Amino acid sequence: MKKIPLLGLSFLLLISCERRLNQALKSTDKNLILKVAEEYEQRKKYSQAISLYEYANKFIVGTDEAPEVSYRTAYLNYLDKNYRLAAHQFKNFVMSYPKDSRADEAAYMAAYCYYVDSPDYNLDQTNTRDALKELQLYIDTYPNSDKIAECNRMMDDLTRKLEKKAFENAKTLYKVTEYKAAIISFDNVLSDFPDTKLREDILIYSLRAKTELAVNSIHRLQNERINDAVNSYNNFCKLFPNSDYLDEAKRLNNRLENARITYQNKENNINEAKDQSEDKLKSAEKERKNKIS
């Protein structure tokens, strides 16, 4: 008896599976279709199982099997990492079968799929914001669920990602010396995320930006900007008296004080020149009147 090589055996099995899949996809026997779909599902051939369950839908509309197939299709798309599609299907399940015992779980899975589809902080965060909305919707809809704590944890995770994104954007503005825009952006991060754990880093970056803006400002705007930066320095020291950035903050404040001295000297020179100019005008006017008389 000849032995079939292992590679050949694998090929034959593949051909057999393909034939069975094609047979099911051409069949009108819902029992055969669902049976083959379950076989593929058990073998973790998710895409084939999904195709079969989707094909079976037209044969089971309005039957007791419809909710089961709908839920399985959504879950298989989740396992196959088709997260946005799975989320959509879980939401449709909840809307179509609100009284089903799995409605709570499906609503949670919809939110969870949005969560796992959230990208790294340095990418577009549209999906992250969608995930936050879906998780909040689940919490509002199922306030007594045992999954509330996990939803809150995921929301915290997503919020930290948005904080990081906003902070990094502000840092980029600082690095390219767009100090005015950077200061506004740092302020917005603190306003949008009042509980952020990045507050210390945000405030030192804001102080750096305000110092650069003040020191390099035109004269008529410099005093106000110096005062604003010094106020930021005092606030930083008050909030973080033991900060690792404290020495740097003090150096920045010294630059501000030196800039204040320079500003004041220039202001004195301007006022002195103005007084001298006014004196000259008065002298010229007096001389003119004397000549007339």
Image: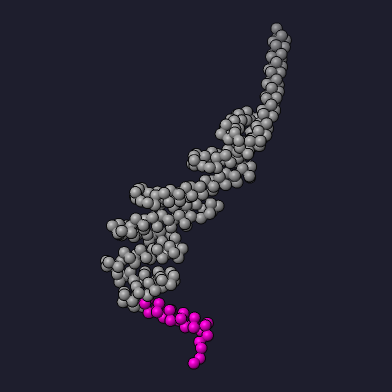
Q: Is residue 209 magenta?
A: no
In this rendering, the answer to whether 97 lies above or below 152 is: below
Q: Residue furthest bottom?
A: 1
In this rendering, the answer to whether 239 lies above or below 287 is: below
Do we see residue 17 in this rendering? yes
Q: Nearer the viewer, residue 286 or 3?
A: 3
Q: Residue at x 70, y 11 (%)?
A: 286
**Residue 267 x, y percent position in the rendering:** 67, 24
Q: In the rendered view of the protein, which quadrant contains the C terminus?
A: top right
Q: Residue furthest top?
A: 293
Q: Is residue 36 left or right of residue 272?
A: left
**Residue 241 x, y percent position in the rendering:** 59, 33
Q: Which residues are magenta?
A: 1-25
Q: Residue at x 63, y 39 (%)?
A: 244
In this rendering, the answer to whether 213 lies above or below 49 is: above
Do we see residue 270 in this rendering? no
Q: Is residue 16 magenta?
A: yes
Colouring rule applied to residues:
one colour
Q: Residue at x 34, y 49 (%)?
A: 144
**Residue 107 x, y percent position in the rendering:** 36, 56
Q: Nearer the viewer, residue 173 or 85?
A: 85
The image quadrant that residue 245 belongs to is top right
Question: Most prominent secondary structure in the magenta stretch?
Answer: helix
**Residue 26 x, y percent position in the rendering:** 36, 78
> How many marks are shown on the rendered structure?
0
In this rendering, the answer to whether 7 lies above or below 205 is: below
Q: Is residue 163 left or right of residue 27?
A: right
Q: Residue at x 35, y 48 (%)?
A: 143
Q: Residue furthest front?
A: 1
